[in-house]
Amino acid sequence: MRLFRRLLSLLILAALLGGGGLAWLALSPVRLNASPLDFQVQPGSSARAAARQMVEAGIDLNPWAFEALARASRSAAALKAGSYEVEQGITLWALLQKLTRGDVSQSELAIIEGWNFRQLRDKLNAHPDLRHDGAGLSDRELLQRIGAAESHPEGLFFPDTYLFSKQSSDLDLLARAYRAMQKRLQAEWAARDPGLPLQHPYQALILASIVEKETGRAADRPHIAAVFVNRLRQGMLLQTDPTVIYGMGERFDGNLRRQDLLTDTPYNTYTRGGLPPTPIAMPGQAALQAALHPAASPALYFVARGDGSSHFSSSLDEHNRAVNKYQRGGR
């Protein structure tokens, strides 16, 4: 069957090329310096330029033959830029078809729920398959380059696994993640529960980021969101540790002390009312849904049980008993 396909390809090529010499050359394997071998075809490359780039990458081919084959098969204008991977045994014809189809090699980067933007930038800068166009930019410059209207980057990028052609720009990946977050945030905002104490989608994003950081068990998200929504409605302080930690930045050493809770920053929800000025992390879809569809609950407090779940209370007395039971070992 393989021999039949090879002969059929040869006949088609011979018909296209008007002779057998170039056809036989087209179906002969090219030599590679390594296998697999990665190479890049730059945007706007002609067949001759693409052949030169492949030779420089370690593919032992005749640039004239590749260009002649591309022109004779009417493929010269159809070559697609991108990053490609080939293995030993590939023929000149198969190589041309690969570039014509745009059969690029891909890599991936996972953006994790709860990451902050500094963590995301670190991952982008360390990824070997990305082109680091944003590495030297400030956060504000980076947002301008991807077309974001916001002035602070935190929370603006949707957590997901993103596939990309190798040597794509990190700015392109960030732009995709930004658009993904805008799409999901606007959809959830349009379908939000009535009567929420939120004035615009950005406030929902802030609340969702807090829910993301406070959640130990997925099923608790709507209940945690309900606590914060109820507190906002009643004008109570949110008093959530993750916002304090975010406001401390690199000063946080892993231990949150009483003095930290008393030290005022724009993100200290023990000293300032309402939501903090920006998100504190990147919330996932479930956190967005919880923030805009909180549980129907009167709870105003919660405390970690120690197994990843939380105990919810609607009064301070009940909350204090839960704290004594789950965090102080009381009975």
Image (cartoon, helix red, strand yellow):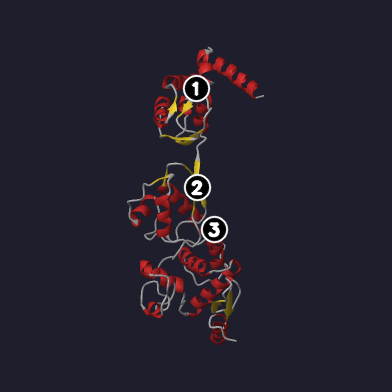
Q: Which mark is residue 74?
A: 1
**What quarter of the picture does the C terminus occupy?**
bottom right
Q: What residue does disc 2 label?
A: 108
Question: Residue shown at 56%/66% (left/top)?
Answer: 290
Q: Where is mark 3, residue-wise? A: 187
Instruction: Give me the residue at 36% from left, 59% from top.
Output: 151
The amino acid pointed to by label 1 is Arg
The tag earlier along the polypeptide, 1 or 3, is: 1
Residue type highlighted by circle 2: Glu
Give the CA distance from mark 1 to mark 3. 45 Å
Decide: few, some or many residues near mark 1? Use Cα within 10 Å; few <14, some 14-19, many ≥20: few
Q: Earlier in the sequence, mark 1 or mark 2?
A: 1
Left or right position of 265 against 312: left
Image quadrant in which the N terminus is located: top right
Q: Name the residue nearer the viewer: 2 or 217.
A: 2
The residue depicted at 50 percent of the width and 78 percent of the height is 231
- Choose the circle earlier in sequence order: 3 or 2: 2
Label 2 SS: strand
- Residue in front for this viewpoint, 171 or 188: 171
Q: CA distance from mark 1 to mark 2?
A: 33 Å
Q: Looking at the image, which residue sits at the far right? A: 1
Left or right: 146 with respect to 284?
left
Q: For residue 217, which quarter of the picture? A: bottom right
Q: Position of residue 90 (x, y in %)?
A: 53, 27
